[in-house]
Image (cartoon, helix red, strand yellow):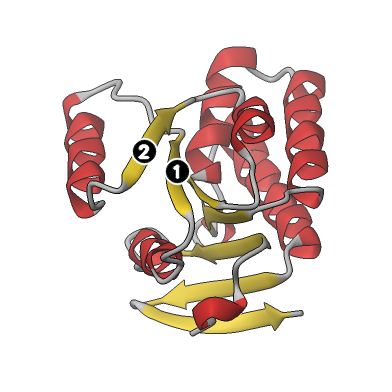
Amino acid sequence: MFGKTFDRGCLFVTGGAKSGKSRLALELCNVLPDKEKIFLATAQGLDQEMEKRIRRHKEERSSDWRTIEEPIDVSGVLNRTDREDRVILIDCLTLWINNLYMNYGDGQEAISNHVDDLIRTLSKVRGAVVVVSNEVGWGIVPGDPTSRAYRDTVGFVNQRIARISSKVVVVVSGLPLVLKDA
């Protein structure tokens, strides 16, 4: 899709659950043979189902991927690992925001500070970063205030990431649609 034209900056991949976002993100990173590959995983194995998903995602990656698991300090990991000769795949923002809600509750100021840090960090990356996130606002409006706040936060964060990204792709039914290719 982008081939070797994507070797620097931020590429944002979004779409619904099980749409093929992670698979596409891996494919986009794997076509960069001259880049060291880092998978920044935000998921936490808090139950058997999530542990199974994490195992499956690890099995999908080849041995040339280095995995860093970080549920909260995503911008800190990016600041420490970003280099011109690396591609970093962040999978996924939706779980990261969930982790922030679990950590800070309804503390919107603390969550906003983490989001602002991430936006600043992504805006100045030297290497290539691929960010994966779900579009959670395409479904039913959640019945409780915390779930609605979470959905709204994900939507606002996705907008901000898309705005600073040089390339944005939405994945629907396994098919990528390029929304932005600056």
Residue type, mark 2 in image = Arg
> Label 1 belongs to which residue?
38
Considering only vertical position in the picture, is 103 above or below 142?
Answer: above
x, y percent for residue 42: 46, 33
x, y percent for residue 164: 79, 60
Q: Is residue 166 left or right of residue 53?
A: right
For the residues marked 1 and 2, what is the alpha-carbon distance in whole angstroms?
A: 5 Å
Residue type, mark 1 in image = Ile
Residue 49 sits in quarter: top left
Q: Nearer the viewer, residue 151 or 21?
A: 21
Considering only vertical position in the picture, is 52 above or below 155?
Answer: above
Q: Earlier in the sequence, mark 1 or mark 2?
A: 1
- Circle 2: is it few (<14), some (14-19), or many (20+) Cα within 10 Å? few
Residue at the location (65% across, 52% down)? 84
x, y percent for residue 13: 54, 64
> Label 2 belongs to which residue?
66
